[in-house]
Amino acid sequence: MNRICLTGRVIADPELKTLGDRVVATVPVSVNRPYKRKDAPYPESDVFRVDVWGSRGESLVNHVAKGTHIWASGRLELRKIESGGCYVDVRDGEWGFVGTRSGAERDPDDMMPMSEDESAPIEASRPQGKGTRAKAAP
């Protein structure tokens, strides 16, 4: 099975192309490596080109911009180039957002729901699930 799943930041605005009667969106995604060299000032990263076809590609172009944190999955494909290196592409991709939008900051007042009278936060109850015990009433 040839399938890759990754999360990373979009490093350029997506491009939409028409090939015959189909449309394809292409976006480069940078994925940080899980380690950092001692002599490097920042973590290294790998860049994957993600191709998304059809209406999902149109949606990608309409909702994603440079700096957006996304996940992508699809078929892995290597393309050799004349200089001896290769490009790594993710074909027939699916995608989605990770976390909040780039640059979007949340208002601290929006992080906790308020009661109807807006004067006090609603008490959050802890779900009772496996491994938790309800305390006995005194």
Image (spheres, grey):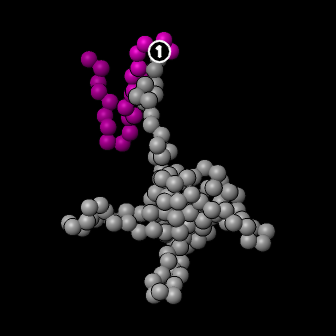
Q: Is residue 69 visible?
A: yes
Mark 1: secondary structure = loop
Q: Is residue 117 magenta?
A: yes
Image check: 137 left or right of 4? Answer: left
Identify the residue at horizontal 44%, vertical 37% (top origin): 105
Judge whether 131 appears above or below 111 on screen: below
Quarter of the C terminus within the rendering: top left
What range is drawn magenta here?
Answer: 116-138
Q: Is residue 132 magenta?
A: yes
The residue under label 1 is which amino acid type?
A: Glu
Identify the residue at horizontal 56%, vertical 63% (top origin): 27
Q: Position of residue 131 (x, y in %)?
A: 32, 42
Q: Nearer the viewer, residue 64 or 41?
A: 41
Identify the residue at horizontal 53%, vertical 81% (top origin): 79
Residue ID for mark 1: 118
Identify the residue at horizontal 56%, vertical 57% (top origin): 13
Image check: 96 left or right of 107? Answer: right
How many numbered marks are there?
Answer: 1
Question: Magenta span: helix, strand or loop, mainly?
Answer: loop
Judge whether 2 appears above or below 58 on screen: below
Residue sitting farthest toward the right:
21
Residue sitting farthest toward the left:
38
Q: Position of residue 59 (x, y in %)?
A: 65, 53
Q: Is residue 72 visible?
A: no
